[in-house]
Image (spheres, helix red, strand yellow):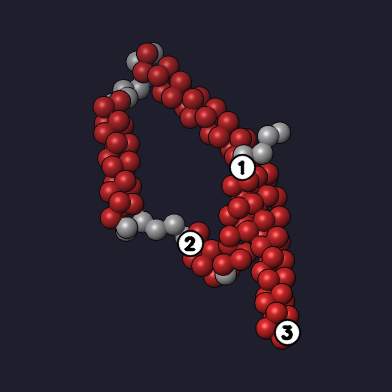
């Protein structure tokens, strides 16, 4: 009988922690969806205006833009990041946070984030 009460108490603790994590994940996913939309739109507008300005200056012969050099640098950066990620040199700092939270809260948080990311408006 004592074993059954112990299992029930542990299960209640696990489900409570999981539920709190899932609720936190849903709230975080909702907030991230709203914030990321504005950040991506803002970055796209700023980059678009920057490249438009550079192209305009080049057509007016006020600046000489070496597009090949820019392309090579961006491609090199992307290649280096892919290589570091594949070799395990670049690690996500989020893993340390997830490991320190514990299994029930981490699983609840992850399920809430994924569930919240796919909720319709």
Categorize mark 3 by other alpha carbons within 10 Å: few (<14), some (14-19), many (20+): few
Q: How much space separates mark 3 and mark 1, taking CA atoms?
A: 42 Å
Q: How much space separates mark 3 and mark 2, taking CA atoms?
A: 39 Å
Secondary structure of the residue carrying numbered label 1: helix
Tell me which residue sits at (62%, 64%) in the image: 105
Secondary structure of the residue carrying numbered label 3: loop
| Residue where numbered disc 3 is placed | 1
Q: Earlier in the sequence, mark 3 or mark 2?
A: 3
**Is 8 or 29 nearer to us in this picture?**
8
Q: The C terminus is located in which quarter?
A: top right
Residue 120: quarter of image: top right
Q: Position of residue 16 (x, y in %)?
A: 72, 66
Front tag of 3 and 1: 3
Categorize mark 2 by other alpha carbons within 10 Å: few (<14), some (14-19), many (20+): few
Task: Give the side of residue 68 with respect to residue 63, left or right.
Answer: left
Residue sticking out furthest to the top: 60
Q: Position of residue 59 (x, y in %)?
A: 37, 13
1 and 2 marks in contact (CB < 8 Å)? no
Q: Is residue 13 visible?
A: no
**Is 111 or 49 nearer to us in this picture?**
111
Q: Position of residue 101 (x, y in %)?
A: 58, 68
Residue sticking out furthest to the bottom: 2
Front tag of 3 and 2: 3
| Residue where numbered disc 2 is placed | 95
Q: Earlier in the sequence, mark 3 or mark 1?
A: 3
Vertical arrangement, residue 19 with respect to residue 45, above or below: below
Q: Which of the labelled discs sits on residue 117, or is there none?
A: 1
Secondary structure of the residue carrying numbered label 2: helix
Tell me which residue sits at (30%, 51%) in the image: 86
Tell me which residue sits at (58%, 55%) in the image: 110
**Is 41 or 96 nearer to us in this picture?**
96
Front tag of 1 and 2: 1
């Amino acid at each position: 009988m004592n074993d059954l009460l112990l299992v029930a108490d542990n299960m209640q603790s696990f489900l409570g922690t999981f539920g709190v994590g899932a609720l936190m994940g849903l709230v975080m996913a909702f907030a991230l969806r709203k914030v990321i939309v504005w950040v991506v739109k803002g970055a796209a507008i700023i980059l678009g205006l920057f490249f438009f300005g550079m192209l305009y200056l080049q057509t007016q012969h006020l600046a000489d833009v070496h597009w090949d050099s820019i392309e090579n640098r961006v491609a090199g950066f992307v290649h280096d990041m892919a290589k570091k990620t594949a070799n395990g040199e670049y690690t996500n700092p989020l893993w340390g946070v997830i490991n320190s939270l514990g299994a029930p809260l981490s699983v609840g948080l992850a399920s809430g984030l994924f569930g919240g990311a796919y909720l319709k408006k």
